[in-house]
Image: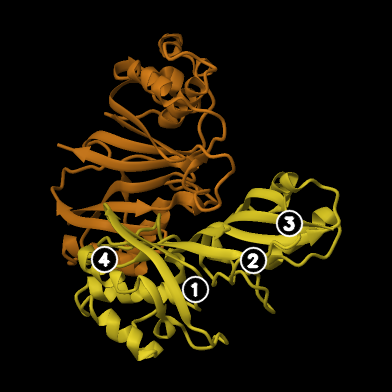
Chain colours: A orange, B yellow
Amino acid sequence: MKNIKLIIEYDGTNYSGWQNQENAVTLQEVIEKSIGQITGEIVRLIGSGRTDGGVHALGQVANFLTNSTIPGEKFKKVLNNVLPEDIAIIDSMEVDMDFHSRFSATRKRYRYVIYNGNMPSPIHRYYSLHYKYDLDIDRMKQGAQYLIGEHDFESFMNKGSIVKDTIRTIYEINIYRQGNFIEITIEGNSFLKYMVRNIVGTLIVIGNKRKEPQDILNILRAKNREAACKTAPPCGLFLEKVYYE
Amino acid sequence: MKNIKLIIEYDGTNYSGWQNQENAVTLQEVIEKSIGQITGEIVRLIGSGRTDGGVHALGQVANFLTNSTIPGEKFKKVLNNVLPEDIAIIDSMEVDMDFHSRFSATRKRYRYVIYNGNMPSPIHRYYSLHYKYDLDIDRMKQGAQYLIGEHDFESFMNKGSIVKDTIRTIYEINIYRQGNFIEITIEGNSFLKYMVRNIVGTLIVIGNKRKEPQDILNILRAKNREAACKTAPPCGLFLEKVYYE
């Protein structure tokens, strides 16, 4: 028995998110079936975390146990031969048996792309949020500074989560503009349900001058989802990288 | 009767190109029908040029004649309400009756995107050519210099074109790399069938060191399509801008 780690890029547009569920096509299911096709086993693929329907990944990490004799680094090639073209294995390797994609992860980086143009862009429609109103990114940067560090992020967690401990640490938020695009990267130790999208939704309201940057402090203190703003849509979100010790 | 000019962005992935044809969904047809839905007329939409199936546009230009009382600048909004989300009107305006999208055009700019990474990218698969081998962009730039100016581009025109005069002028070719992406922009007075894609296909072979930059001179002199290299696929190509006096 060996433990195989995969680094995965995917276009989440046509999937109901990462995690398996009834009557929906998920990334986990499609990749598990592809592995099964190759090894002849029924495998359980452990992701570093769920991504929601429509969310993309540039560097999702997952692992599975197998008795296959295929060398770890070969899984990249053999899986890419059978996977649909909206999923690609970027890298594969054998890892220690105690490696667990979720529990061993120490840090994650997400990227959120806003297309801040006049009209919705056909070319970028599946890979960005279209937001046509003014956004002052200096205000967004100021607001983001209040989120850095260890905080109770309950106000940024959607209901329906079974998580009890809502303390998380954000290490870094970067916001920059390039032409009509605004990109926000967020690095933290771990994230609550919809946390990145709720942070982005709130930073957009601050950038649009309907809230002040320092309002973030009150939102954090409220520990209530209703204190923060609307969840930004999934299509702008990319899981960029998962870090391990 | 008035003449309306449209500037159009589209994702060409799901269309059999610009120009109407039997048993195929084309951009021209879909936009003509949308205009008809609004004006109640049967209109003929004149594009600045055809784009092939799978080719995208950031700034295609087209015009049509109408008796509608809708002001020129309003067509943007009313058309975007009925067009599918892979087509957007960026701008609309009333123009002189003698404006003709194709005959009045003096210059066009195309952009070609190469994803020069190890693995095909799910995220960028419809909007770039995946090329995994080494590309030396300094060699590509040297090769491109031989194409600047007025030349007979017959070697870069695919067969099946009825065009007799194959003399064209290229004003500018820019090539730059950003991470895994290589972008090539080409500006010229007008382009032959598949000319941009054949130039890109040839520059790729030069970048990969299978031809020398100065081989472009022999290819031009040959006046034979077989002297140039394979046509680059449509998905990496964007019609970026059409210029008028």
Q: Nearer the viewer, residue B124 or B211?
A: B211
| Pointer 2 or 4: first along the chain | 2
The Cα atoms of the two marked residues, 2 and 1, are separated by 14 Å
The Cα atoms of the two marked residues, 3 and 4, are separated by 40 Å
* Residue under disc 3 on the same chain as residue under disc 1: yes
- Residue located beneath label 2 in the image: B47
Q: Residues within 10 Å of mark 3 (few under 14, many from 20)?
A: few
**Mark on residue B191?**
1
| Pointer 3 or 1: first along the chain | 3
Camera sees residue A15: no
- Residue located beneath label 4 in the image: B141
Q: Nearer the viewer, residue A111 or B32?
A: B32
Camera-near label (3 vs 2) is: 3
Q: Secondary structure at mark 4?
A: helix
The Cα atoms of the two marked residues, 3 and 2, are separated by 16 Å
Q: Is residue B138 above or below residue A109?
A: below
- Residue located beneath label 3 in the image: B96
Q: Amino acid at mark 1?
A: Phe
Camera-near label (3 vs 4) is: 3
Q: Amino acid at mark 2?
A: Gly
| Pointer 3 or 2: first along the chain | 2
* Residue under disc 2 on the same chain as residue under disc 1: yes
Q: Position of residue A199 (x, y in %)?
A: 43, 25
Query: Which subunit holds the residue at mark 2?
Result: B
Q: Residues within 10 Å of mark 2 (few under 14, many from 20)?
A: many
